[in-house]
Image: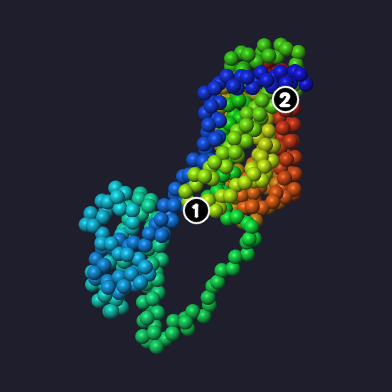
Amino acid sequence: MKKIRAIFLKEIVDAMRDRRTLTMVLLSSLLLVPTLLFVFSTVMSQVESQAVDRTVVAVNMADAPSLENYILRQGYQITVAEADYEQKSRSKELIKPVLIVPAHFENLLAERKKIELEVAYDTSNRQAEMGLNPLHKLLDGFIQERASLDLMMRGVSPEMLQEVTVKERHISRPQERKVTITGMLPMILIMAIVMGGMFAAIDSTAGERERGSLEPLMMNPVSGLQLAIGKTLAVATVSALIVILTVLSFFPAQNIIGNDALRAEFQFGSHDALAFLMILLPLAMALSSLQVALSLTCKSFKEANVRNQLLSLTVSFLPLYFILNPGKEPSWLAWVPVMAQTQMMNQVLKGELLASAMMIPAVLVCLCLVVLSLSFVAKKMREVVAV
């Protein structure tokens, strides 16, 4: 046990010596979630501002008094578009789509001819694009009102054509939280674990081989298993520190959310933080052991970095399953690392309790990965030096 502790402390000291890399990793873990939540809340506020802003920018509205009347009755204000509205939309000075009314609109309407209303905006102007949906809903309402008036003029009640109506009934539990943009947070947390422990895993294996410091270490009276446990524990400690700091950053992150809807959705308390730690710490240990085993098979720091990047890419693709296959998750997901943790974190964000049917298989799989990786590293440790 003393030998394992000595190896562990030696690897921790080595990791602390690379202060620039360590500082960058720790700061990124503290700032990543607050930064992303701030960006999410800003984007959502922009979308909502377009929905709340009841202004229609129009060209030639004077030729469409009936449309103008309808828009005003809906509580909107009409602004005449400037002559250079196209240029201002391209330069982002105009952040609203522009409604273009054709000439002789009322005459065409009276003659029941097909009329084409244009909505102009620059596709690179994201704020203008956000205003499309409210404007389309407004125009659809005008079209439906005109159709209903035409039917009534002919003595036909519009209700006769609406024999079927649709009504929504929400069956979600009262305590269940809505998860939209925050559903991306589990994937970001897992990536933080992978990237955080990677530098320590590479430096303690391939880095030492490249510097020639692994051979002197093996001259000490320690077994391959002791070396494997000591190095893996050191890397896992760094990963666990990343996990703890990232989860703790959720608390101050809630204070910088500027969007009310996102603030109501993202309610992260101490019980949620504890659940996240229970989910992520076993995964951090498993991924750390895999990174150590993978890095040990490489002869240079560069080669180990490339292989670990491929591991990170693979891990990042696994949570995409939930985006590509929304709905009820199959039971076998509990036995797939990363995917099981993603599913459980999503449940926590929704306000649900962790089920033992999910938690136990996920922890067992992580422990199996740790044992297999330690066995591999212990066997290869002496062989690496002999090469």
- Residue 14 position, x and y percent, is 61, 19
Which callout, 1 or 2, points at the residue further toward the start of the chain? 2
The residue at 52%/36% (across/down) is 31
Q: Which part of the image, by quadrant, shows the C terminus?
A: top right
Label 2 sits on residue: 229
| C-alpha span from label 1 to label 2 | 47 Å
In the rendered view, tell whether residue 348 sits above or below residue 242: below
- Residue 348 position, x and y percent, is 64, 49
Q: Residues within 10 Å of mark 2 (few under 14, many from 20)?
A: many
The residue at 49%/40% (across/down) is 35
- Residue 380 position, x and y percent, is 71, 22
State whether residue 29 appears in this view: yes
Q: Nearer the viewer, mark 1 or mark 2?
A: 1
Question: Which residue occupies the extreme bottom position in the image?
Answer: 155
State whether residue 99 appears in this view: no
In the rendered view, tell whether residue 14 sits above or below residue 52: above
- Residue 225 position, x and y percent, is 75, 22
The residue at 31%/49% (across/down) is 92
Instruction: Give left or right: position of 326 versus 93.
Output: right
Give the residue type at disc 2. Ile
SS under mark 2: helix
Label 1 sits on residue: 260
Q: Nearer the viewer, residue 174 or 8?
A: 174
SS under mark 1: helix
- The tag on residue 85 is none
Q: Nearer the viewer, residue 139 or 350?
A: 350
Give the residue type at disc 1. Asp
